[in-house]
Amino acid sequence: MPDAIRRSRSETAGRILIYGTLVLFAVYFLVPLFVMVITSVKNMDEIRTGTLIALPQQPTLEPWLKAWGYATIGVTNEGIRGFFWNSIRMVIPAVLFSTLIGAVNGYVLSKWRFRGSDTFFAMLLLGCFIPFQVVLLPMARTLGFLGLSESIWGLVLVHTVYGLAFTTLFFRNYYVAVPSELVNAARIDGAGFFRIFWKIMLPVSTPIFMVTIIWQTTQIWNDFLFGVCFSTGETQPVTVALNNLVNTSSSVKEYNVDMAAAIIAALPTLFVYFVAGKYFVRGLTAGAVKG
């Protein structure tokens, strides 16, 4: 009986230690978000006279309205609204194109192997380790040749091409776990390349599609380097506009407007994770254990 009591106490202490550590980490990561939120609903007088973590005495949405509609960014007073929609118009097609092409590539490299396919896949994987800076000059020349410089569709092309290595890797590793007997049986029945892909592979691909969509959405939406290099003026994404807002010189530094703009810029990725987060974990673990 004493041994059972000691084990029970030890297990309880272990749980307390684990949960206490998790709570500390959660607080550590949530405090900056808390500061951003409360600062974004304070007026400047409260920010000047109060402390960083003090709750707002007179909450106001004026900083949010200004950040969205009429804050000074560069030489314009139109807020981040237009740049936010630029990012929407860029992210949706870039994510769709890179995901669909990656799905086809992964299908080919896993189920329709050809001479040199392993070498081709190894070379493709190099794209996952190429820094952004390496592709800036060749991509700029390519966009100029295609007439897509400083345009939304130019950014779509850049993100689609750069993301193909990642999306192909995701789908290839997922499709390897799909039984090849299904594909072989469909071939015997006369099904062709795209019919097998449409009828067999796609119906079982929901988890990996969610993983890829979340990954690409996050990477493309949060990108700053490609946006600042390949866009200008009215075609810039929201990340570049946010940087310009924070660095715009004026007589008064409006921290509440800056915080509101930062939260607005982060809302789409937060929404994607809240809505599809469970599918992301499912997709990452799918095929991890074969039984």
Image (cartoon, rainbow, N blue to C red):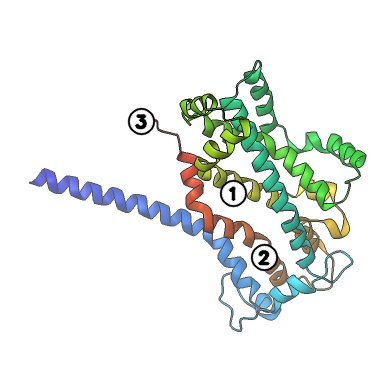
Q: Dot 1: within a 10 Å radius of its alpha carbon, few (fewer than 14), some, or many (20 or more) residues?
A: some
Q: Which residue is drawn at 68% across and 76% down?
A: 48
Residue with the most extreme left position: 1
Residue with the most extreme front position: 189
For numbered disc 3, what is the local secondary structure?
A: loop
N-terminal of the two: label 3 or label 1?
1
How far, Cα to Cα, is label 3 from label 1?
Answer: 28 Å
Q: Indicate the quadrant containing the C terminus: top left, top right, bottom left or bottom right.
A: top left
Left or right, residue 49 beside residue 10: right
Q: List the residue tagged with mark 3.
A: 291
Q: Where is residue 234 in the image (x, y as percent from the top left)?
A: 86, 60
Residue 170 in sight in this render: no
Q: Which residue is drawn at 12% across and 43% down?
A: 3
Q: Which amino acid does label 2 sit on?
A: Ile
How far, Cα to Cα, is label 2 from label 3?
Answer: 45 Å
Q: Dot 2: within a 10 Å radius of its alpha carbon, few (fewer than 14), some, or many (20 or more) residues?
A: some
How far, Cα to Cα, is label 1 from label 2?
Answer: 18 Å
Q: Dot 3: within a 10 Å radius of its alpha carbon, few (fewer than 14), some, or many (20 or more) residues?
A: few
Q: Residue 4 carries which label?
A: none
N-terminal of the two: label 2 or label 3?
2
N-terminal of the two: label 1 or label 2?
1
What is the quadrant of residue 268 in the picture? Answer: bottom right
Q: List the residue tagged with mark 1.
A: 214
Q: Which amino acid does label 1 sit on?
A: Ile
Residue closer to the observer: 51 or 214: 214
Left or right, residue 115 beside residue 278: right
Task: Determine contact: label 2, label 3, CB under 8 Å.
Answer: no
In this view, 10 is above or below 234? above
What is the quadrant of residue 168 in the picture? Answer: top right
Q: Which mark is residue 264?
A: 2
Q: Which of marks 3 and 1 is in front?
A: 3
Left or right, residue 66 beside residue 42: right
